[in-house]
Amino acid sequence: MVGVTVVGTSVTSVLKVDSKEVQLSLARTAVTYMQTVGWWTAPACIALLAILQSLTKPSGSEAFRGWARDIINELRDDVFEEEDKKAPALHRLTLFQYRKWSWALGLSIRYWRWPGSGWLIPVERSGDVTRRTNSAFPAGDDNRTAGVVGQAWAQKVCIYVPNLPSIDPKCDEAAIKLYAQETFVSAKWVRKQKRRTRPPSRSYCGVPVEVDGRRWGVLLFDSCHPEMIEKAKIVRKCIGKSKELAKMLKNV
């Protein structure tokens, strides 16, 4: 709840300011207004931010997150070759959950979509230092999806994308457009990845997840290797974990 703490501290500071000491007339007017209505707006803003933060958090308790992490790590290790198990940052597995609503303002602005349009939100990722991620994708009933994960959700089939071009500061526009086309994202998004420390993955595999016959989310494998493990092996390993995964996700 860092955002709640910051907003609460900021509002409290404004309420304590002597408006007569504020030099700029516009700022003085703003401070005076905040102090006039602050008795009800400050608690309301803090409460609203707390609600929005809770709505954008991944589902599930800490116990669920721990259980999910164990299964995700086991499945990742089962799929990738022995030598790749020592490089979790380069060969990852992320569990995405479908959620009708997302109040993450950045997502709505990035994809120009209403918060209630349907989203795939990351719940858990393999590894330790690689676990933090804010990569979410649109997945609404209007067929407007993005990314390999969005296509796996929309088509209800395993989407396998190997042999992607390397995206780095030296790559040309042709490589950027090809990567965007093959991974169902915009060229603008790919260009932004050129400046990141970890370059975009060279292969992906998205596997839809069902619980009691209903779509729940997607498992997304990604690797720095152009040739990921064969699609059949990934599907076979996921089927082997499907009962355990469905049991865990049933009440989430």
Image (spheres, rainbow, N blue to C red):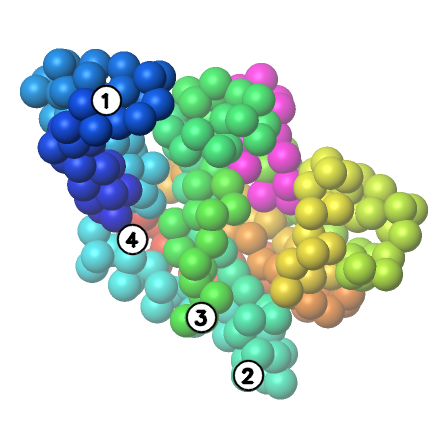
Residues 234 and 101: in front is 101
From the viewer's perspective, is residue 91 above or below residue 191? Answer: below
- In contact (CB < 8 Å): disc 1 and disc 2: no
Residue tagged 2: 86
Mark-to-mark CA distance, 3 and 4: 24 Å
Residue tagged 4: 248
Q: Is mark 4 on a helix, strand or loop?
A: helix
From the viewer's perspective, is residue 6 above or below residue 101? Answer: below
Instruction: Tell me what residue is drawn at x 58 percent, y 17 percent.
Output: 142
In the image, the segment drawn in magenta is 137-149
Q: Which of marks 4 and 2 is in front?
A: 2
Mark-to-mark CA distance, 1 and 3: 43 Å
From the viewer's perspective, is residue 91 above or below residue 143? Answer: below
Q: Quick one: label 4 or label 2, which is nearer the N terminus? A: 2
Left-right relation of 164 to 146: right
Give the quadrant of residue 148: top right
Q: Nearer the viewer, mark 3 or mark 4?
A: 3
Q: Position of residue 170 (x, y in %)?
A: 86, 61
Left-right relation of 36 to 10: left
Q: Where is residue 213 in the image (x, y as percent from the top left)?
A: 41, 35
Total labels: the figure holds 4
Residue tagged 1: 31
Mark-to-mark CA distance, 4 and 2: 27 Å
